[in-house]
Amino acid sequence: MPHERLSIYKISDVNQEIDEPHVLSKDIILLMMINFLVMTAVTTQIGTLPLYVTRLGGNAAMSGLVVGIWGLAALGARIPVGKWIDRYGRKQLILIGLVILMIDFSTLIFMSTLMSLIALRAIQGIGNGTQSTAVATLVADKLPQKKLSIGLGYFSISQTLPAAIGPAIGLLIIENWGFQALFYFSLSLVSVAFLLTLFC
């Protein structure tokens, strides 16, 4: 009865596909949106802050410090955050990171000295390092084990796309509306990401 066996296999394969969870679940889509918004807010400053440093009277060395201290702070934040994620929970760490970023961008709107800019960039790195580590961990937890690599590939789009469009958006904003508008724009993106996290 080869035909009967073939039909049984086909039915079982269909049932298996139906039972398997989808890669792009509601939570995964929300986490991708959150990561996209935050990374866009951050990358809009990659090409613009050196110009802001020059406007404040700084030199090339100061520009390098403002850009580099963000990466060092983000890297340093990831070390303890990796332990805190299991202790305090993924969502809580995402919210803490976003609150840090919202406070940071809000302060950038009103502070206009080189020393405050350097300090706020370091704080921004801590907030982003906290948020991004917690988001990536939660994504890995939510993805089906059999489709982990596919899901992470989709999630990486929310990181690479902002890197491609963020600097251009930042330059467009400062050329037309100035640096204060850029900080307001970044603050609004992070605020929306915070609200989306509450539904995750």
Image (tube, helix red, strand yellow):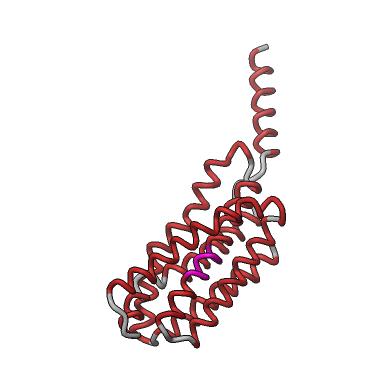
Q: Residue at x 46, y 72 (%)?
A: 121
Compared to 88, does 68 lie above or below? below
Q: Quick check: 182 left or right of 77?
A: left
Q: Quick check: 163 left or right of 74?
A: left
Q: Main secondary structure of the magenta part?
A: helix
Coordinates of residue 114 in the picture (x, y in percent)? 40, 81
Q: Residue furthest left?
A: 60
Coordinates of residue 140 in the picture (x, y in percent)? 60, 47
Q: Residue at x 38, y 62 (%)?
A: 164
Coordinates of residue 86 in the picture (x, y in percent)? 69, 50
Numbered label tally: 0
Q: Quick check: 88 left or right of 34?
A: right
Q: Quick check: 29 left or right of 58?
A: right
Coordinates of residue 3 in the picture (x, y in percent)? 64, 17
- Magenta-tinted stretch: 122-128
Depth check: 177 or 70 in front?
70
Q: Is residue 124 magenta?
A: yes
Compared to 27, does 1 lie above or below? above
* Quarter of the figure that contains the C terminus: bottom right
Compared to 1, does 58 lie above or below? below
Depth check: 149 or 50 in front?
50
Q: Tell me where residue 46 sits by quadrant.
A: bottom left
Q: Is residue 118 magenta?
A: no
* Quarter of the figure that contains the N terminus: top right
